[in-house]
Amino acid sequence: MTKLNKTIIPIFYDVTPGDVKLKTNLYVNSLKAHEDKVDKPVTEWREALKHAGGRSGRELNQAGFVKFCMDIAAEVVKELKTREKLITESLVEDKDRVEAIKSLLDMDSIDVRFVGIHGMGGVGKTTLAKVIFNEFIGRFEHCSFVDGIQKLSRTEPTKLQRKLLGSLIKSNIKIPDTDDGVKHIKDLLAAKKVLIVLDDVDQREQIQ
């Protein structure tokens, strides 16, 4: 599942995340029983289970099966509708610029990467950013494309922070001031692989 770069929403039905992460005997004993017969597949199964159990998912509880299914369906529909950005066909054919940005991102690196796209107005900076965003969203735990940075950072900085957080976790968060917003953002992004595109930035402070 990691090789295909697909978005995964684990659903824990009649099991807990701990079971799937092999912290209980539920799957551990079954895997051991198979090891003598098929060693390599068992190793792959074990790694896949641990990976799935470590991802944010949904666990069926007392809320009821019908509501659980409806919530999952709503989450999937929301992801399908909001993640990809609409782009014009003209830039899709400009592969040189797209490949240049992709090489700068260096997806195999574990470091934090900042890539800036600059130029005169109307040359296609936003469209290029959307192309990159659409191509890589499946490789990150959380993704956000926030536009209007220049205006919001000057007039409503807390609204900008809410917009960023809301797009990352698909939920509304109350932010009383910018300091509280910074704390929320740091807590959310810590030790996670995220892709954030900030459109219309004209000052370094807006990124900080």
Image (cartoon, rainbow, N blue to C red):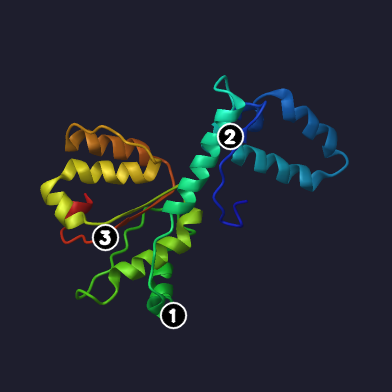
Q: Which mark is residue 69?
A: 2
In the image shown, does 97 or 153 lie closer to the viewer? 153
Q: Position of residue 158 (x, y in %)?
A: 19, 41
Q: Position of residue 201 (x, y in %)?
A: 20, 60
Q: Which amino acid is tagged 3?
A: Asp
Q: Position of residue 44 (x, y in %)?
A: 71, 46
Q: Residues within 10 Å of mark 1 (few under 14, many from 20)?
A: few
Compared across the picture, whether 208 is left or right of 17 comes to left
Using the numbered discs, state the Cα–Cα distance from disc 3 to disc 2 in whole angstroms: 35 Å
Q: Which amino acid is tagged 2?
A: Cys
The residue carrying mark 1 is: 93
Task: Specify the farthest residue to the right.
Answer: 37
* Disc 3 to disc 1: CB gap under 8 Å: no
Determine the residue positioned at 43% across, 43% down. Answer: 192
Q: Place residue 129 in its image quadrant.
A: bottom left
The residue carrying mark 3 is: 199
Q: Can residue 59 be seen by looking at this rendering?
A: no
Secondary structure under badge 3?
loop
* Residue 53 versus residue 201 in the image, above or below: above
Of labels 3 and 2, earlier in sequence is 2
Of labels 3 and 1, earlier in sequence is 1
* Residue 136 versus residue 62 in the image, above or below: below
* Disc 3 to disc 2: CB gap under 8 Å: no
* Residue 51 versus residue 136 in the image, above or below: above
Q: Which amino acid is tagged 1?
A: Glu
Determine the residue positioned at 67% across, 26% down. Answer: 14
Compared across the picture, whether 78 is left or right of 12 comes to left
Q: Residues within 10 Å of mark 3 (few under 14, many from 20)?
A: some
Which of the two discs, 1 and 2, sits closer to the camera?
2
